[in-house]
Structure formats: structure tokens, C-alpha cells
Image (cartoon, grey):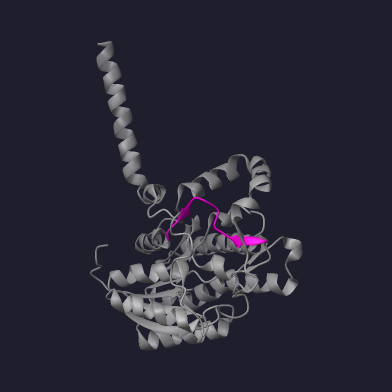
């Protein structure tokens, strides 16, 4: 990736692993200063090493995104230590893989507080600094599940739907005010991240992303592109995301039946779930004495390293111009044939 001329201060929540970790690496390759936020200190130190190895500057800030006061305090610390925040990326989440009736009320609330209110808390803390300066970008990392609920992920789907509504509401308010603070959202497909090794699960077999699966670097590149081009309201990553969102718009009842039939098996491997599998719902799976999970999960042999659809989502103008050229050529050829 081409190194940016202007090095920015970028905040990434959920930076200890997965999409957050991959995004931090992509920003680091540009030479940006990256503030790394998450609960797991082992993963945060690993992310710091990644950023510094790739040429960026890093700051580590352990915080629970569900605690708005702690988030605001950390944000003030970031600006004091690293400088004014240019980009804020919300990624941090947790979840439970189970039927809704098998999720305890406090577990469902915890998922909502981290996965939805964590985005709200991060956005609020960023806006408190960006709005007076009338500049800055906030990127919400979403999912196809922000539009389409699937079985076994009711808490996560509900949180992502809420984030989508929050994003749209905030965006219209900023547009009304003529603000130069930008907000955009990136809807992700199934990604090969460590979450499937540490999310609380009550499934009989190991959890997996719904195929096709993409590498976290695909998601990270899309996040950086969105941060550079935040005027678009949202971006879609992965052909499966586009297909899901289109099908949900036009034939949602058909998709209901399809997911009822396939959604349970497609989210599990054939391997039994280990009884001692880590769960990060209440405490980070990578605590001070834990392991650094990194950006990748267990599915490297299945994951795609690129997404043609993500490129298409980022280059609507080029595709439209190309399509117009093709149409014009066809029309000209038809006229010539008639002559």
C-alpha cells in the first residue's frame, strides 16, 4: 500500500486480534500513529509490535468499551500522548453462539453493551474532540448481519442492526449541520478471525464463519479505504455480503427459509467443540498470562486473500463509466451494422 504523505493519529478499538488487529497493521504500513484499544493486554502488546515493525507508532490503552467513562478518559489520554485524533475505527465486539433460548439474560445484555454500546461510546468520545475542530472520520465496522439476522447469533445480529440504525441517524444529523466530520460503515462477510476460538459457544461442534471466508487483511484494507473515502455512507466487502443484502431486500421470506435450513450447519465444523474452549464474554481470552491470538483464526486453508466485490464497492464511478462506454460501443456497432 502506498504510504500516506500525512501521518494521522488513528484509534482502533478491538485492536488485539482479528479485523481490529489487521486494520491496525494496514494503518501502520502507511506510517500512521495507531492507538490500540482492547481488554486483552497480551494481544495489545502483540499489536504494538506489529505496528512498530511495519513503520508506525503505537500506543496501547487497555479499556472495556462498554464503560463510557473509561472510554472517554482513555480518549483524553490518547490526545495528550499521541496528538489530535484524525480517524476512529470501531471494531470491538463480543458474542454468544447459541439459540436465543439458551442465552442467559445477563449474557445477552453483555453482548449488547460491548458490541452496540461500545460503538456508541467510542463514537461519542471521538465526536467530543472532532466536532469542535470540524474535522475527522469515524469508521463503523459492520457486517452483512447488520441487515440480515441469522440463527445462533441473535445477540450479535441485534447489536449490529442497532449499530446500523445508529450510524444512519448520526450521519443525517452531521449532514444537516454541514459538519466536515465524516462517518461511514463497512459491512463485512465471514472473516477468518480468532473469535471462533474464543466466543462463548453452546454449539455441539466448533464454530466457524459462514463460507465463503475471507482473510482479515481483506477487511483491514477495506477499513483503511473507507477511512480515506468517508463520504460514502457504507461499503460492502465480499460477494456473499452483496448477495445476502440484495436477497434480503427483495426476497426476505425466501432467505428466512434458506437460513433456517442451512444456518445451523454452515456455522459449525465437523469437529466437536472443546469443553475447555476459552470464552471472552466477561474477561479477555488473552489476559496477561494468556496467548496472543493475532489477526488470523483457524481457517487459513479456506480463506480468500482478496475480494473482487470489495474493489467494485470502492470503484462505482469507474464501473459506471466502463458500463457507459460498453453501452455506447454496442449502440455504435448496431448503427454501423444497419448502415
* x and y, in percent, of residue 280 in the image: 59, 75
Please name whichever residue, 283 or 177, is drawn nearer the observer in this view of the structure: 283
Please name whichever residue, 322 or 220, is drawn nearer the observer in this view of the structure: 220
* x and y, in percent, of residue 174 in the image: 48, 65
Note whether residue 117 is visible.
yes
Write the residue at 52% across / 44% down.
243
Residue 158 painted magenta: no
- The image quadrant that residue 261 belongs to is top right
80 to 92, vertically: above or below: below
How many numbered circles are shown?
Answer: 0
Write the residue at 27% across / 62% down.
1
Write the residue at 59% across / 45% down.
248
Note whether residue 135 is visible.
no
Left or right: 234 in relation to 94: left
Residue 211 painted magenta: yes
293 to 175, vertically: above or below: below
* x and y, in percent, of residue 170 in the image: 53, 65
Please name whichever residue, 37 or 4, is drawn nearer the observer in this view of the structure: 37
* x and y, in percent, of residue 221 in the image: 37, 61
- The image quadrant that residue 219 belongs to is bottom left
Q: Which residues are magenta?
A: 204-215
- Give the residue furthest to the right: 101
Please name whichever residue, 301 or 258, is drawn nearer the observer in this view of the structure: 301
Amino acid at each position: 500500500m502506498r504510504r500516506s504523505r500525512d501521518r494521522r493519529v488513528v484509534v482502533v478499538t478491538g485492536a488485539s486480534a482479528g479485523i481490529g488487529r489487521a486494520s491496525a497493521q494496514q494503518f501502520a504500513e502507511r506510517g500512521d500513529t495507531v492507538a490500540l484499544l482492547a481488554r486483552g493486554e497480551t494481544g495489545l502488546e502483540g499489536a504494538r509490535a506489529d505496528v512498530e515493525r511495519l513503520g508506525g507508532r503505537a500506543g496501547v490503552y487497555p479499556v472495556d468499551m462498554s464503560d463510557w467513562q473509561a472510554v472517554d478518559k482513555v480518549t483524553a489520554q490518547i490526545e495528550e500522548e499521541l496528538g489530535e485524533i484524525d480517524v476512529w475505527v470501531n471494531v470491538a465486539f463480543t458474542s454468544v453462539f447459541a439459540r436465543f433460548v439458551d442465552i442467559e439474560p445477563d449474557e445477552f445484555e453483555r453482548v449488547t453493551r460491548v458490541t452496540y454500546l461500545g460503538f456508541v461510546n467510542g463514537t461519542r468520545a471521538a465526536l467530543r474532540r472532532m466536532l469542535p475542530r470540524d474535522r475527522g472520520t469515524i469508521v463503523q465496522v459492520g457486517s452483512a448481519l447488520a441487515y440480515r439476522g441469522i440463527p445462533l447469533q441473535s445477540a450479535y445480529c441485534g447489536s449490529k442492526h442497532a449499530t446500523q440504525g445508529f450510524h444512519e441517524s448520526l450521519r443525517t444529523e452531521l449532514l444537516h449541520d454541514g459538519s466536515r466530520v465524516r462517518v461511514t460503515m463497512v459491512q463485512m462477510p465471514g472473516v477468518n478471525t480468532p473469535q471462533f476460538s474464543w466466543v462463548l459457544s453452546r454449539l455441539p461442534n466448533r464454530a466457524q464463519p459462514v463460507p465463503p471466508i475471507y482473510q482479515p487483511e481483506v477487511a483491514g484494507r477495506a477499513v483503511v479505504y473507507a477511512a480515506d473515502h468517508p463520504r460514502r455512507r457504507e461499503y460492502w466487502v465480499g460477494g456473499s455480503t452483496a448477495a445476502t443484502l440484495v436477497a434480503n431486500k427483495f426476497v426476505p421470506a425466501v432467505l428466512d427459509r434458506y437460513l433456517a435450513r442451512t444456518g445451523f450447519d454452515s456455522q459449525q465444523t465437523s469437529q466437536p467443540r472443546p469443553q475447555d474452549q476459552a470464552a471472552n464474554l466477561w474477561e479477555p481470552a488473552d489476559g496477561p498470562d494468556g496467548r496472543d491470538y493475532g489477526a488470523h483464526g483457524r481457517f487459513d486453508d479456506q480463506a480468500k486473500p482478496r475480494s473482487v466485490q470489495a474493489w467494485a464497492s470502492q470503484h462505482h464511478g469507474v464501473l459506471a463509466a466502463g458500463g457507459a462506454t460498453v453501452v455506447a460501443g454496442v449502440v455504435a456497432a448496431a448503427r454501423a451494422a444497419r448502415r
